[in-house]
Image (cartoon, helix red, strand yellow):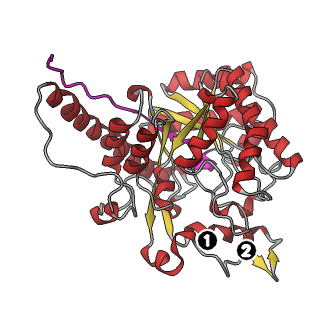
Amino acid sequence: MPIKPFNPQYMKIGILTAALQELTPRQIRDADPDRAIEDWVAFARELGADNIQLSAALHPSEADVPEEAMLDPVANTLDLREPFNPTRATRVLNALSEHRIGLSDLGYFDNMLHDDAGIREKKRQFMLRVFDAATMLGVDAVCGFVGRNQTRSMDQNLLDFEDHFVPLLKEAKARGLTFRVEQCPMPGWTTNDNFHNNIAYTPGTWIALHRICEKAGVGDQFRIHYDPSHAILMGQDTRSIFQYLKDAGYNFLIGGFHVKGQVINAQGVAAWGYGGQTIQRGDWKDGKPSENPPDQANAWLKQTVLCEHELPGTARHDPLAYLQNRTVDWLDHQLAARELLDLDVANTQLIVEHEYPPARIQDAVRLKPILQGSIAFTRCIDQAAACMYALQHQVLASQDIPSQGTGREPFRS
């Protein structure tokens, strides 16, 4: 067997532009929509990122959910009140070239299975605008949610997926795009008691949905944009998820990553368990959902009572928490990706997503060093994992020298 050289492969480090929504003040970007993208591209260069994931959303004046009811600021860096066009695309591509920043993909995170046919069609038309913008900008993927029809069971939602989401995937296929689904269960998306409001929330459903896609001829268009914070929210760990996918023959499904953690509040779990707060949240008044939008935001206590999002690098190193699946073991996360998934590592995107509440600062001067530190941390962790993988699985293996120890094991209790 030939001796393999030491040749670590690093992933590409990017950031979702929703990390700072008010980089360009609303009154400026509403009048000049692409100014927001130009400003973010320049900011990304200062942060030390390789790429941006460009966030799109329905403008607050067009959204079906009031801004006051949302957990996060409206993330419409890409403003599509008017359709994208070649002139706008040239302007954005020139900014990317000037600042030497790449574009990983476009993100639009919404409920594409909404039970109201009119609202669902509005979201569908907006998604098609995102698809068209992606094509004009030369990227090959769009990232988002599947969603859930709140009036139907989970099994019935499989039929809704076939009826309403598969046609979107056919539109993606016609444009040469892949749709990568982030697996957040979105527990606070509704004031009712459903915890799983994005049906593509876990490997079991990913596989079921992919089988539907294969029958419809769009299996290659359906992929997962994995975010470990949501695994922690549901008591899962990355290595076990990746091992399960490999064992099931579906380790090709993950096509990109959000780098965002979750820190479980053990006291919150003691009080409410992993289902989150079920009563007296404040999102219901007089026996019915409150009509006051700020009250509706209390539905997120289904999630936030038991955990808090981590911006990578901001949580203290806690090996016991890793073992209990109460925070992300970033090094093992990156090792497991290389060891268990079918990836083109050098072209895989690691996108930092910032939702750590105390640091959701809408002030570029204050936020800049925070994001710089998180991006640098993410890059170093990935480089460390790449070096470990290359040394153990390539260099040592080619010389028939065993690695030491056992490491973290999947399915261990």
Which image quadrant: the N terminus? Answer: top left
- The region drawn magenta spans 1-23
Q: Which disc is residue 282 wearing?
A: none
Element under disc 1: helix
Residue 405: image x %, image y %? 15, 48
Q: Which residue is drawn at 31% across and 62% down?
A: 323
Q: Do the residues labelled 1 and 2 touch (CB within 8 Å)?
A: yes
Crowding around mark 1 (Cα neighbors within 10 Å: few <14, some 14 to 19, many 20+) is many
Q: Which residue is drawn at 64% across and 76% down?
A: 278
Among numbered discs 1 and 2, the one appearing first in the sequence: 2
Residue 163 vertical position relative to residue 21 in the rendered view, above or below: above
Q: Name the kind of residue labelled 1 in the image.
A: Leu
Q: Which disc is residue 301 wearing?
A: 1
Residue 272 vertical position relative to residue 166 in the rendered view, above or below: below
Residue 153: image x %, image y %? 73, 57
Which image quadrant: the C terminus? Answer: bottom left
Residue 386: image x %, image y %? 28, 35
Between the C-alphas of marks 1 and 2, the distance is 9 Å
The front one of 39 and 331 is 331
The front one of 211 and 344 is 211
Residue occupied by mark 2: 283
Left or right: 35 as drawn, with respect to 305: right
- Examine the image and state in which quarter residue 167 appears: top right
Residue 231 vertical position relative to residue 16 in the rendered view, above or below: below
Q: Which residue is drawn at 54% across and 57% down?
A: 361
Crowding around mark 2 (Cα neighbors within 10 Å: few <14, some 14 to 19, many 20+) is many
* Furthest-right residue in this view: 118
Residue 215 vertical position relative to residue 243 in the rendered view, above or below: above
Element under disc 2: loop
Q: Name the kind of residue labelled 2 in the image.
A: Asp
